[in-house]
Image (cartoon, rainbow, N blue to C red):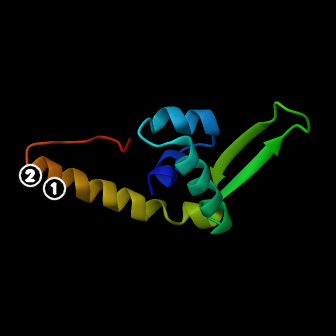
Amino acid sequence: MVILYHLKDSSKRYGELRKEMPGITEMTLSLQLKQLEECGLIARQVYGEKPPVKVVYSLTNFGKSFTPVLDAILNWGNEIAAQKGEYVKSIT
C-alpha cells in the first residue's frame, strides 16, 4: 500500500522510491514491485536496451482506481492520530 501511495501522484524510478521509503530493504522493494506488477496495479516501463537502462514505475488504470481507498485510509489514520495528539501528513 505504501508503494501505491508513493506512485499515486507521479511515476517514479526505483531509486526515487527507495529514497522515499528508507525503511524498506532493496530485496523487499523489488519483490513488492514485481508482485504489484503481476497484480496489474503498477506498470514497469523500461527505456533503453543496454545497461544502464531507465526503469520507471507508474500506476495502471486499475491501480489509479485504488487511489480513493488510499486517500480514505490516510485521512482515517490522520484523524485517529489527531485525536491521540499526533498528526502525520504523509506515509513513509
> In the depicted view, which residue is nearer to us: 21 or 90?
21
Instruction: Indicate which disc residue 83 carries.
Output: 2
Q: Secondary structure at mark 1?
A: helix
Left or right: where 36 falls relative to 25:
right
Up the image or down, 51 lies above or below 66; here it is above
Q: Amino acid at mark 1?
A: Ile
**In the depicted structure, whether residue 4 falls above or below residue 9:** below
Query: 35 or 27, which is in the foreground?
Result: 27
41 or 36: nearer the viewer: 36
Taking the image as shown, residue 69 lies to the left or right of residue 27, namely left
Q: Residue 43 placed where, x, y %?
A: 69, 56
Q: Quadrant of residue 13?
A: top right
Taking the image as drawn, is residue 51 in sight? yes
Q: Residue 24: x, y in percent?
A: 46, 43
The answer to whether one can see residue 60 in this image is no
Q: Quadrant of residue 76?
A: bottom left
Q: Residue at x 34, y 42 (%)?
A: 90
Where is residue 39? Give x, y as percent.
63, 69
Residue found 63% across the figure and 43% down from its top: 11
Q: Is residue 52 left or right of residue 57?
A: right
- Residue carrying label 1: 80
Mark 2 touches mark 1? (CB < 8 Å) = yes
Characterize the local packing of mark 1: few (<14), some (14-19) or many (20 or more) Cα atoms within 10 angstroms. few
Residue at x 56% of width, y 41% of height: 26
* Three-letter residue code for mark 2: Gln
The CA distance from mark 2 to mark 1 is 5 Å
